[in-house]
Image (spheres, helix red, strand yellow):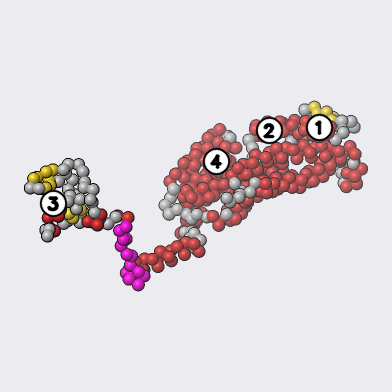
Amino acid sequence: MTDKSNNHLADPSISEPNEESGEPQHHFGADLQVGGKKTQRRGSFSSSFSPRAVVLPPSPKTKEAPSEPSEAEASPVETERTDQTEQVEQVEQTEPEVVAAVDPVFESQRLFLLLATMLPLGLFAFWPSFKLMSREWYYNLDYGHGFFVIPLIAVFLYLRLDTYPGTQRRLAWIGLAPILLSCGMRFYAVSQYFDAIDQWAILFWTLGVVWLFYGNRVFYWACPSLLFMIFMFPLPFRFEVLLRNRLQEFAAKFAAMLLTLLGETAVPIKNTIRMSTMELDVAAACSGIRFLVSIMAIAFAAILLMRRPWWQNLCVFLLAPPLALFVNAVRIAMTGILLTHFSDLVRWYAPKANNISVVADEISGIVMIFVAFGMFFALTWFLGKVFQRVEI
């Protein structure tokens, strides 16, 4: 019989498991004892290797993952956290974004503080300017819309209340910068007798007061509506005269071109259009300033109310002046056509009129007002229909 305990000395292919890791120990180059002599075989294994004697360690891929606790075995804390997470996700999916509520008590207090301090101070400082502007609004038809500017600003602010951000708790001291600028403009205007600068100082005073008492967010919210105040200020006299002369020459040339396209004989000479049977004088009232200011004011109001993309607002505002000049030239050409071919109809419309050219000018002006409004709203409709937002 053979001692089984010494088999590993006779056969090097048999591995001896390690006591700590359980891995087999291969006797690579182990000492062998054959026939009473001790020999050493290096660098080779025996061909009679038996795979049954090898105990392989478990592969890391085949290790079983730790079993997760079932729902019944889960701790109550984890269950409560899971329920709370699901409830939060449901609320985020169903409920809209919550906007911070405006405190009406604080808003009324801040408004009372504004009306009790800055409004009387502003009226006392700028009362002479308001008197001059109201006189200009009453006697000059080109600026007759000035009476409606402040009520329209109140309407614009009311229609945008759905986006009101709320008053800032602390005063925004940066608002003192426009206030100090307006004070400097008023001092210079009074010392140099420059009424236009004194009137424009009202705009900076208003912007600074709103910025100081209501904060940055309300200032950014109200600034577009407050800028509408520029339409209540009359133009400086020198600039108005220069602009009026340029517009008269342009209107005469453009109206003569339109009359020529219609088959009429029309030659522009400065502010006069010589036709075959008459001379049509383009007076200062026909220069187009009234159309220009009116259509630009309507464009500004449309920008505030429509809430279109910025590039559409820019297109509307930039196309308003050419539209006004075109409408004014068409009005002059229409007046020439009425006086040349429909003079009897004009006399029938105003039999007691001494000058039928004035009546023809009034008729063409009324008609072109509606034409101008129609062209403007057609332009805004075109921009809204052609360029639309598409979600991808």
Residue 238: % across, % down? 65, 32
Image quarter hosting the N terminus: bottom left
Amino acid type, callout 4: Ala
How far is mark 3 from mark 1, CA to CA? 125 Å
Task: Give residue 274's position: percent from left, percent from top.
Answer: 84, 29
Three-letter amino acid code of the residue under disc 2 = Leu
How many residues crowd around disc 3 within 10 Å: few (fewer than 14), some, or many (20 or more)?
some
Query: What kind of element bears circle 4?
Result: helix
* Magenta-highlighted residues: 62-77
Mark 3 or 4 closer to N-term? 3
Callout 2 environment at 10 Å: few (<14), some (14 to 19), or many (20+)?
Answer: some
The residue that mark 2 highlights is 243
Q: What is the C-alpha distance between the residues marked 3 and 4? A: 112 Å
Residue tagged by mark 4?
201
Relative placement, left or right, of 309 versus 172 is right
For label 1, the residue is: 256
Q: Position of residue 176 (x, y in %)?
A: 46, 44
Kindly report the distance in space between the C-alpha atoms of the residues bearing marks 4 and 1: 41 Å
